[in-house]
Each structure stands twice: as C-alpha cells, then as structure tokens.
Image (spheres, coloured by chain):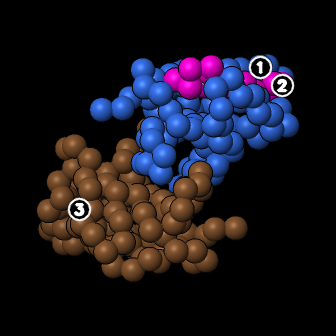
Chain colours: A brown, B blue
Amino acid sequence: GAVVSQHPSWVICKSGTSVKIECRSLDFQATTMFWYRQFPKQSLMLMATSNEGSKATYEQGVEKDKFLINHASLTLSTLTVTSAHPEDSSFYICSARGGGWGYGYTFGSGTRLTVV
Amino acid sequence: TQLLEQSPQFLSIQEGENLTVYCNSSSVFSSLQWYRQEPGEGPVLLVTVVTGGEVKKLKRLTFQFGDARKDSSLHITAAQPGDTGLYLCAGIYNQGGKLIFGQGTELSVKP
C-alpha cells in the first residue's frame, strides 16, 4: 500500500531557530500534499495544501511567511517553521494524495515539535 | 468555511457497552472518511463512505452516511478496551479536494 514517510518524528529546538520537516511518498507520486497541525487532545487542523511545482495554498489564519512549504518534487514536500516560538510547539502531520481521483489520503506518522 | 461538527468530544464507557459518534455539516460531502488515531501517530483510515444512505460494517463498527450526504455516524457494538483512542471524521467537500476533520471523539473503554 501507499506509504508516507515523515521525518523527524520528534525535534526540540531553541526559540528563534528554524526547523524543517520532510514528508516523502515512498511508493507513489504525490501530486498534492497537505500539512496539518494538532494540539494535544484536539483534532487535525489543516494548515496548507501544496501541489507539486506550485505555491502552497494556506488556510485562513496560517502565516505563510512563518510556515514555509516547498513541494519541489512528486515525492517530497517540506514544512519549515521559521523563527520558532514556544507556541509553535505542536504535532505536525503531513498527508499525501496521488494523481488521479481516488479516496486515498495517506498520512505520515507525524512530527512532535517542542520549542524551548 | 466548511465546518464539521463531531460529537461527543469525550466518551468514557464500560467494556461491553454500545456507543455512537456523530458527524454533521451544513455542507454536502462528496465523500466522508472515518479515522482512528493513537497518541503520537498519524491517523489510520477505517472507512470511506461515498453514497447517500450507505452503510458499511467493519467487525463491531458500523458506519452510516446520511441520505443527503451531510452527516455520518459511527456505531460501536460491545466496546472493548482495545477500542480506546481518538476517532476522527473527515469530509471531502469536492472531488479531489482537501480533507477537513471534525473535532474528534476521545473514547475511553474501561475494563
């Protein structure tokens, strides 16, 4: 089946630094990738949608200059949290969907970000 | 803005009891999915419902899609401690579109 690999699984960084999270589709080409954020005991909140080779579309209230998304290839999308602050600490999850209509949204295993 | 209302948000029951989780929206879904998520992991797909009125069963779990494709329910029969987890409904509002999640239901089944 479709597999999405997300790295790192957890990261601790200092305030003011930037952190990059990678999301890779291992056995299919992901024309569209989605990035979600999840706080403890809460649901997944969609941050942005990225299509290969084009700019990401951000949801309302998400700062695009703070959460930089790059989808340079059909198998890789990255989320960079710039100038991280403690309030950015959260669980970040990516999801990938292949080309052609289907119901398959494959999720990565998530990245636990802690900003100290 | 599409909103997906999921209820209840928390549920604590005894082993052997039945339960139902609801997912409602004012918008029509092209399809709806149910996921289960364990702490520290990504959500795992349980089922996708597409046709209004559709009913799907997965062992002790029964999923129903409303006739108007605006609501769905998940019913668990004879819950077991292993069913404990976060259950999420997610709606797809247009073909090939983004997946929007409900608030989630944190289920705890006590032995």
- Label 3 in the same subunit as label 2: no
Say few, some or many: other residues with alpha carbon within 10 Å of mark 2 (under 14 / 14 to 19 / 20 or more): some
Q: Give the chain of mark 1.
A: B
Query: For the residue marked with disc 3, what is the amino acid?
Result: Phe
The Cα atoms of the two marked residues, 3 and 1, are separated by: 42 Å
> Is B23 left or right of A64, judged from the image as shown?
right
Q: Badge 2 is on which residue?
A: B78
The answer to which of B67 and A88 lies nearer the viewer is: B67
Query: From the viewer's perspective, is residue B98 above or below residue B110?
Result: below
Q: Residue at x 65, y 32 (%)?
A: B51
> Is A41 left or right of A104, judged from the image as shown?
left
Q: Badge 1 is on which residue?
A: B18
Query: For the residue marked with disc 2, what is the amino acid?
Result: Ala
Asked if marks 1 and 2 touch (Cβ < 8 Å), the reply is yes
**What is the magenta range?**
B64-80
> Is A68 left or right of B91, judged from the image as shown?
left
Helix or strand or loop: what does disc 1 sit on? loop
The Cα atoms of the two marked residues, 3 and 2, are separated by: 44 Å
Helix or strand or loop: what does disc 2 sit on? loop
Specify whether residue B76 is painted magenta.
yes
* Residue B13, x across and y down, in percent: 70, 21
Helix or strand or loop: what does disc 3 sit on? strand
